[in-house]
Image: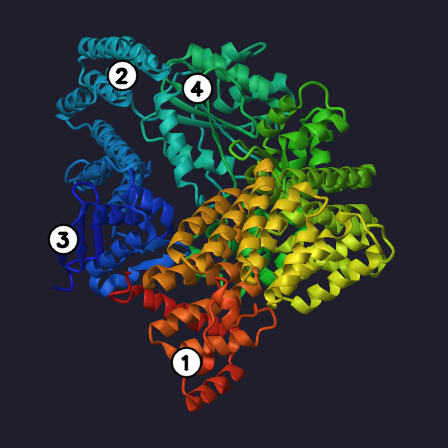
Amino acid sequence: MSEHEPSLPALRVDVLGPLALRVGPAPVAVPGGRRRALLAVLALDAGRAVGAERLIDALWPEDPPDNAVQALYNHVSRLRGHLGPLAGRIQRSGSGYALRLEPEELDVDEARSLAAEVGNAARTPAERVALARSALALWRGPALEEFRAVPALEVQSVALDELRLRLVDDLIAARLAAGEPDVVADAARAAAAEPLRESTAVLHVRSLAADGRTSDAMAAARAFRRRLAEETGLDPGPAFADLEQAVATGALGAPLRSGQVGASLVRRPLPSPDVPLVGRQHERAEVVRLLAGHRLVTIAGPGGVGKTSLALDVAAGPGDDADVAVVDLAAVDRAERLCQAVASSLGLRLDGEIGPADVARGIGDRPMLLVLDNCEHVAEACRSLADAITRTTAAVRVLATSRAPLHAPGEYVVRLQPLPVPRDAGDLDAFRRQPGVRAFVEHARRRAPGYEVTAADADHLVEVLHRLDGLPLGIELAARQVAVMPLSDVRDRLDRALDLATGEARAGDGRQGTLRATIASSYRLLAESDRALLRALAPFPGGADLDTLEAVAADVRVPGDPVDAVHRLVDASLLVADPAGGRFRLLFTVRAFLHDELRERGDLATAETRFLDRCLAIARDVGVRILGQEEAAMDRRLRTELDNLRAARDLARAHGRDDVRIGLTLALDEGCIWRDLREPWTWALELAADPGLDGHPDQAQVLGAAAEAARLTGELDLAQELAERAMEVAGADPAPARVSGALRALGSVAHFRGDFDRARDLWERSGQGREVESGAWLASAALAASYGGHAEQARRMLDRANELIARNRCGSHLAFAAYVEGELRAATDPAAAVSFYEDAIVTSRSAGTAFVAGVAGVALASAHTRLGDTRRAATGFADLLDTWRRSGHTTQLWTTARNAAGLLVDAGRHRTAALVLVVAGRQPGAAAVDDTIARTSGRVYVPVEDVLPPGELDLVREEAARTDPGRVIDLLRHELADLAAAPGADA
């Protein structure tokens, strides 16, 4: 290859036509429909992890095999083989896989990149023509046509077909702008190929009109209108009617020159954006697309989000020969002065009192893009003006910026959101490419040329960006500070974020000088009742659902339907709505502003008290309903409310509200036992250590909850100590609710230490007098009876437990009972136990209870070991090690490790197995196991003395003494992954 010849990418996947794979210069055949579908799905999600469930649905949309996970792994393994030296590009991520592709290694990415450049108004028409042709040349046939039966890829194929059609339209539009003589025939062919596509019909009509064939253009427009009505029952959009009018009046009959405006209009120089436009390519393209077909587009969003910058960038390159005028309304302080201000800015020579109709007539019918910037404080007047212009003129488009939509007829709204910000800075190169980071760096370089984010600063910047909510103005103001202080100091000063730029308002717009001024200007436009609702929501860091919002609205006496107030606040860009999640939240900076307002008004204590009372009510409601058939919904609610509940605990301590601290902890105690929510466990442990709890009526229950938390984290000695204190505090003959947690914890400790008879008795007692919980803990008692060798007693207890559990249909309890059923069968018939473990896992996951899915997963992997299915056993154990590490279940982590060691012994990997067994035996939270226990339970027992000869075992014990336990888990994880991938690992 010569030095001037472009090099091929290391890997290339093409889906714009029949699927094709190339590794280096050589094409590689990928046989089999499922393997091809797997490659297509991974490629189209390049760099992002695709979950195993989604991949299974894609490969087997109708009837997945019983061993779907294993079958998927087989296909992944073979696909890695096709990649040869680049096999490592397919990476395991959680329970799924990701394919890492570099730029230019996927034809879809190349096509989209070219399409974005085609839409770049800074490009000349000739450049756009060349770019569109290059993009269209990538299609070798219909995209993903061979996968139309795969739902996940069918959706992608529709989107790619739309991309191709849009490029065809863009090519014709660019050729029209370039004045190519033969474009009419190609426009007619495109319209014939897509007879119901309005954008293509528009271009066909425009091409005929530009060619001077006005009558043909009108005939084509009438034919499209008739065809659309006959086949769909619809009429074309307003833009098509505008086009017909423009053709009829001859406005499109001849090329228009820039600056050709009415004699009464003076064109003024355009202001340029004073900040770099970063991360707004999608929104810019959407604004340009809407302006091409609609007369009024509003860019809406919170103050400081970059509306003006985006509008000015669009105005700088409208993409046609229209004139552009920008009118800044920031200084217009009264609505009745709006029309005069617009007329003056445009240079219209109008006499007398000026109204919207006068401005519209003064502008005339020349093509123009009129930008009305900063409309929110004169929104009603802007609405009237925009309506008059779009009704009176034929070729004027209006682009407005406002914190709230204008609600004008025919208005299309692009709601601008804060810039996306990274969650972490693990990959520094990827981190630097994030829009929020790029914006920060660009602004910083204006004060400190050459500035770059270092690895040492990256974590500080993550926090800065998150606490500024990705607001471009906040990012700009924070970035200014790096010229005079380290980034760590910028982070530490974020409590002053609202005033970062005090005294340095932007020219012509004092409202943008600081974040405080920006937010205050929107806040002052609200009615007092809406302000009161905002202030009442300020203490909620995790936002509020509709029930909470309505309760708060009633408390502060918001008149009318609270939902109407919500609409007003969302329109004002002061409240962020998540329609899918049903929640409403405040940006960090808005919350900070409202907290200051509450302090100044002397209302902060009242607002915080209201917040505490509401959080306590939510916790109690969730705690009751999560133990019934609403468990899945309550699990989602608990997780979304966790930020609020956490804040309530901290605030309750400051307010001396022990009723809230204790109430939150006890309300969520039983529900959180089954979940991977470690934080609520720690609440009980913190309370138990608080000397102020001594003598409290709920002390016994708090100590019992703390004992449960300690055993969940593997601190069995502490669990026993706390539980025994709880029993002592409760006194003689306590109410069942006061000691149920302590009895459960004592039962768990006895169970893990191999005293199954005691565990059975304690668990059975823990549920007495408590119908909802009795079924679950009776199932635990059945498990202990089974492990203790009392099979018939275990059977009777589990049957009774099932009857009780069936009454309330709690998902975690149903799942646990299915797991226990599997354990009752495992010792004698592991094959029969498998289906019960699998049912437990499915039911547990649907209810959000990772704990039961985990323990059932350990049992399932152990069953696969006994059945000789090495690959499924190794894969299961490896995934579970990750699960227990994340959730902090130390006892389950080492139980899983010990069971996995048995699999390594069977596979001949004795040294690692011995190391795991020695280290597991030294962990205080590891469950007890011996030969007798193993015979009547799912626990695996392998005497370490049987694994290695004495001399080698001594060396392993020495190694174990100096090796961190976490490192041993890493080694085990690696061995299991290697074992799962080994040839012949299938059963």
Q: CA distance from mark 1 to mark 2?
A: 88 Å
The location of residue 743, given as percent across then percent down, is 71, 56
Q: What kind of residue is marked 2?
A: Leu
**Closest to the observer, 4 or 534:** 534
Tell which tag, 4 or 3, sits nearer the viewer: 3
Q: Which residue is mark 2?
A: 252
Q: Which residue is label 3 attached to?
A: 29
Which residue occupies the foreground of this view, 690 or 576? 690
Residue 424 % position (x, y): 50, 57
Classed neighbour count for the residue bearing mark 3: other residues with Cα under 10 Å, few (<14), some (14–19), many (≥20): few
Residue on which the image places disc 4: 265
Q: Residue furthest front?
A: 792
User: Relative to residue 798, is residue 417 depicted above or below?
Assistant: above
Circle 1: is it few (<14), some (14-19), or many (20+) Cα within 10 Å?
Answer: some
Q: CA distance from mark 4 to mark 3?
A: 65 Å
Name the quarter where the N terminus is drawn.
bottom left
| Three-letter code, disc 1 | Val
Q: Tell me: residue 831, above or below residue 345.
A: below
Q: Which mark is residue 947?
A: 1
Depth-wise, is mark 3 or mark 1 nearer the camera?
1
